Image (spheres, coloured by chain):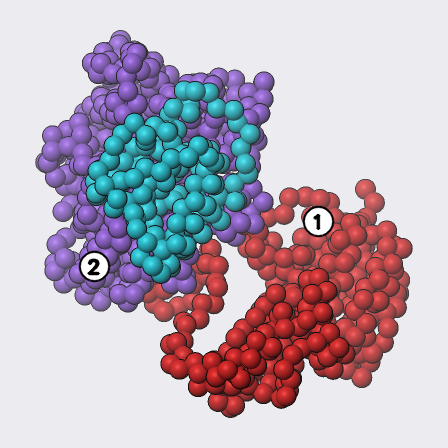
Amino acid sequence: MKLELGYINVKGVKFATENKFENGIVYVDELALKELLLKDSSLEDCNFDVAYPGESVRITPVKDVIEPRLKVEGPGGIFPGVISKLETVGSGKTHVLRGMAIVTAGKIVGFQEGIIDMSGPGADYTPFSQLINLVVVCKPAPMVEAHDYEEAVRLAGLKAANFVAEIAKDAVPDEVMAYETKGLIDSINEYPNLPRVAYVQMLQSQGLLHDTYVYGVDAKKIVPTILYPTEIFDGAIISGNCVSACDKNTTYHHQNNPVVTDLYAQHGKTINFVGVIITNENVYLADKVRSSDWTAKLAEFLQVDGVIISQEGFGNPDTDLILNCKKIEQKGIKTVIITDEYAGQDGKSQSLADADVLANAVVTGGNANQVITLPSMDKVIGTLKYVDKIAGSHAGSLADDGTIIAEIQVITGATNELGFNKLSAR
Amino acid sequence: MKYILITNNDSLLNSSYKNINVVYKNCSYIEVLLRVRAYIHKGHTILTHPLSSSLKPNETPFKSILISGSSKGATDAFSVDIIEQAIEAYKKFPQSNKSLNQKIIDDFKLVDKTVIESAILNNL
Amino acid sequence: MSKLRVVHYINQFFAQIGGEEMAHIPPEKRDGPIGPGLAFKAQFGDEAEIVATIICGDSYFNENLDTVTKTILEMVKEEQPDLFIAGPAFNAGRYGVACGSIAKVVQKSGIPSITGMYIENPGADMFKQDIYIISTKNNAAGMRSAVKDMAPLGLKLARNEKIGASIEEGYIPNGVRVNFFEKERGSQRAVKMLLQKLAGKEFVTEYPMPTFDRVEPQAPVEDITKAKIAIVTSGGIVPKGNPDRIESSSASKFGKYDIDGVNDLTAETYETAHGGYDPTYANKDADRVIPVDVLRQYEKEGRIGQLNRYFYSTVGNGTAVASAKKFGAEIAKDLISQNVSAVILTST
């Protein structure tokens, strides 16, 4: 399967009365977008705003971040089985609006979290401070139940992304990157002397606000399976996860999965990257045993020499991470795991809720309990009303002037467990 | 009963789950963990992860954990590991001084309920 | 701005007084830098100066631990320094323990302190959680690079500046996790680490898993009524008077004691050497720590085969893991030679 990603550099996002893309500027017909999103009866209203890198702007509470992408050639569409028809994606050509994102914000539940600061010390901790963010702030219709509202906001973000991507459909990419993964035998024949490597991606799957969808299927209902890496670039995996802002994988993270990208960068040079095994992080312990058995079995079946395993979330997934690592190592396959840490505010506590000696190669996204002071910003998109209620903050976290003292776990993507960031700890 | 659900979330009292004896007590998060540990010491097996949901132990006051309905006699080592690790993890979070309004309390109850139901409804 | 005041601690060897034959000399204080202090002076430039150097023999220090730390602390305080530096000790064991001990005491008095040693120096394991210990090479050829790391970290401590992660500052990881920004993103680091691991080359994990050194349990004793059972304890039980002088903390040895004919441990005959718990009840009746009385009774009733003639004892209080491992290996060897079939291990 071969996919070409054509990157179109975005230099600005402006609201206008008609959609157009000109000189790197995306002009968005605000009313048309609003009309599209409000077709969902679960939403009473939505508003838009744009935040640029370096501005004194705070976006909170953030639900999801999505990159606008458009399928310009080949089967299927972006976010298959969710808002595009159900068809296998990952081949042909896809355009990417690089440098911008759709950010959905607004309260889902009373303890909603997620902060993106566009400047100041907090900006160093979130990759989204580097993007031009078109923020969609949603408001639920009266009496809408939490599940339905979560779904409505999730879909609103995806729809807005596809709407915006469509605006630049005729643009010529500034850069094109091609990615190809062949069938296993062809792949082995092509690079017989390179070590075979797979990527085991664990998906958050614990229930309301903790879900991930694969081609529209709730990940807690899957058994581990294999994807071509390019499927992920076309939105095969989307986030329905609103909890634990620092180490939840947003849809943007999935679309730009850094492990996939960096394994591709070595593909055919130092390794033979044969595919992605996806698995889940269910609450039911028997599910964990089954899923980890299966990831190990699939890794063995692919006859790989090594895997990278990434995690999502806190606590419960630590057990899945260690089970996956242990069982794959016991098959004689080398592992490197990517996680983050909850070592306490003083950094002295045990970082993970599980451990094993076989997990001897760990990459960490840093200690999520590190306390940070986020100075007030001139403008808030969304609301600060919930800051006192979010994880890692405490009553009194929010000063009258808008300064927030909290753990970095309140910052969207701060300790990402796909290895998206440079933050680490020792 | 085949299963016991230890919980401090009263919203679970309104539902009846097949084969599950819901043991509710109005108590703290840590007390739920400790009560589960006591059952484990008596030979019950833990069936759902005690740190279910990404909500931190000092964030949500509610916790529901499913265990086997009967003792298998000997203490299950895997269950002991899991519950002890959860108790350790609980301790490293500073205790919250947040006052929660009713809406937030209801949301925490809802998340706890749906998370535990994701195990119950899919498996039992 | 005036220069920061530094006091430096070194042993007899680095003061060029002598080697082992001069290790007995008591502490003395001299003005200005001496020996390695000159390297620090060069590294500090205008920012700090070594106002005094304290020299003490390694044997003297370790044999007079309680009094010598007090004496040296007073010497340090007289100088009203902003920073105290001990060593570096490289792989010299007693010098390392001396540097760690004195730096810990001085730091506790409110004066920022730092030392340096090789990771396998026993002092590193003992004191890495108390003070910053710069990781050095295993001999004095590494002086230049040791000073290069120790001086800037020392200045930061003296100025109460934020201390970075161990990998940035060069100190031995002390169990405190500190965030910092790497040069490459995590996924790239993961790919690189995997490549190293696949090639069978060295790689360094960013988070060492807590190791509990798990030991696979032995198969159960088949017939306890025929078993020869020995007692091994870290609870410090010794014959009255502590004939082997097992230390009350950071034990450097274990004792092997004959209990042939002993049916009960009494307050007159046994006591504990352990300094980490209230000894009242152990001293009153040491059977509370090692149940010799009960085992004798079981022996008589035929419920166990026999109680081994010797029991083994050390003090677990602050004892380095490396030392404990060594004791364990020696004790195990001895137990096997006596055909012991089971051991009761007690702690406190």
Q: Secondary structure at mark 1?
A: helix
Q: Residue at image x 33%, y 40%?
A: B5
Chain A tint in image? purple
Write down the residue under mark 1: C157
Residues A177 and A141: in front is A141
Query: Which chain is rendered red in the image?
Result: C
Mark number, residue A381: none
Residue A38 drawn at (x, y percent):
24, 13
Residue A325 drawn at (x, y percent):
33, 57
Crowd class of label 2 (few under 14; some 14 to 19; many from 20; radius 10 Å): some
Residue A42 drawn at (x, y percent):
25, 16
Query: Which chain is rendered cyan in the image?
Result: B
**Mark count:** 2
Q: Does the image show residue C24?
A: yes
Disc 2: which chain? A
**Vertically, is A130 above or below A303?**
above
Disc 1: which chain? C
Q: Amino acid at mark 2?
A: Lys
Q: Residue at image x 52%, y 41%?
A: B93
Give the side of residue C310 with respect to residue A104, left or right: right
**Vertically, is B14 above or below C163?**
above
Instruction: Kindly report which numbered mark, 2 or 1, lies closer to the viewer in this rendering.
Output: 2
Q: Amino acid at mark 1?
A: Leu
Residue B14 drawn at (x, y percent):
30, 27
Write down the residue under mark 2: A297
Residues A298 and B35: in front is B35
